[in-house]
Image (cartoon, rainbow, N blue to C red):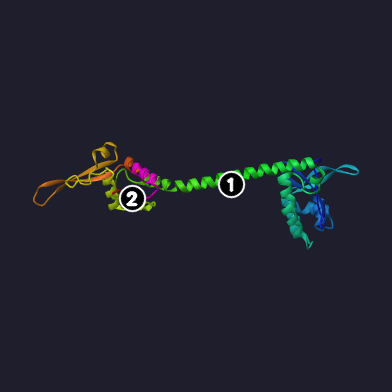
Amino acid sequence: MDNVKVFENAEFGKVRTVEIDGEPWFVGRDVAEILGYKNPNEAVREHCKGVSETLTPTNGGNQSVKIIQERDVYRLVMRSALPKAEEFENWVVGEVLPSIRKHGMYATNELLDNPEHLLAVTLKLVDERKARLRAETEKAELEKQVEKDKPKVLFADAVASSSTTILIGELAKILKQNGVDIGQNRLFEWLRVHGYLISRKGTDFNMPTQRAMEMGLFWIKETSITHADGHTTVSKTPKVTGRGQTYFVNVFLNKNNEIGVAS
């Protein structure tokens, strides 16, 4: 067990650890002795579920020792009668495990005794900090972009869920519901001012202009009406096509949701 790391605490003493496949393991006897068990080996055997064995160097040569996983350390803590068992757990959770997972060592005497390792760890921390800052910056930019695109997404959903053609008043409601300060009358006026609807008074008032029809923005619904005296007239109603809905949504978005009626 060449990668054994010894963690030492003035109050609890020493506990040996080893990292296997990126996971920390603890010498079970060390943990059980610290936690006040009279028979450490028996405590490990009775209370621990993930027991394994490894070789560790001693004065008499390499010896096999039982090692336990992190969750088994907690099992021993919970069953310990030691008054300061919880403090031991806090030390393991707050210092030992973070040190193993971030640096593969206990960041105290080992660093001081190994300047090259100290430099390597420092450079690693710098790289981690840079990566974290980049990730935070990218996240902030993404959130900002999501917030910026939120109206566009809502508009797109609204258009997608609408019928093939809708009344101009219905388009005004969709725009209003999604943050555009405009109602039906103002939308009609805006469409007339900007050349999408005929503005001159007469039978064609508020009908789509030739340009708007050629662009495929509107469809005119014609309804025959038979009057009481027998004569028939045709009622024309402009409706916004799916293409028109998408087109006007984009127009309003490009104006930053602050559509004013041109004079």
Residue 218 image position (x, y, % from top left):
27, 41
| Magenta region, residue range | 246-258
Is 154 left, or right, of 45 in this rendering? Answer: left
Residue 55 image position (x, y, % from top left):
83, 42
The residue lying furthest to the right in this view is: 60
Residue 154 image position (x, y, % from top left):
41, 48
Q: Secondary structure at mark 1?
A: helix
* First-in-chain label (2 vs 1): 1
Residue at (12, 50) in percent of width and height: 227
Q: Amino acid at mark 1?
A: Glu
Residue at (79, 45) in percent of width and height: 111
* Pick the front one: 22 or 113: 113
Which quadrant would the N terminus be assigned to in this image? top right
* Secondary structure, magenta segment, majority class: helix
Query: Of the residues tagged 2 and 1, which is closer to the observer?
Result: 2
* Pick the front one: 68 or 152: 152
Residue 246 image position (x, y, % from top left):
35, 42
Taking the magenta stretch, the answer to whether it contains residue 61 is no
Above-or-below relation of 132 to 181: above
The residue lying furthest to the front in this view is: 263
The 10 Å Cα crowd at callout 2, few under 14, some 14 to 19, many 20 or more, is few
The 10 Å Cα crowd at callout 1, few under 14, some 14 to 19, many 20 or more, is few
Is 56 left, or right, of 175 in this rendering? Answer: right
Label 2, on which residue?
260
Tag shown at residue 136: 1
Is 78 left, or right, of 57 in this rendering? Answer: left
Q: Is residue 173 visible?
A: yes
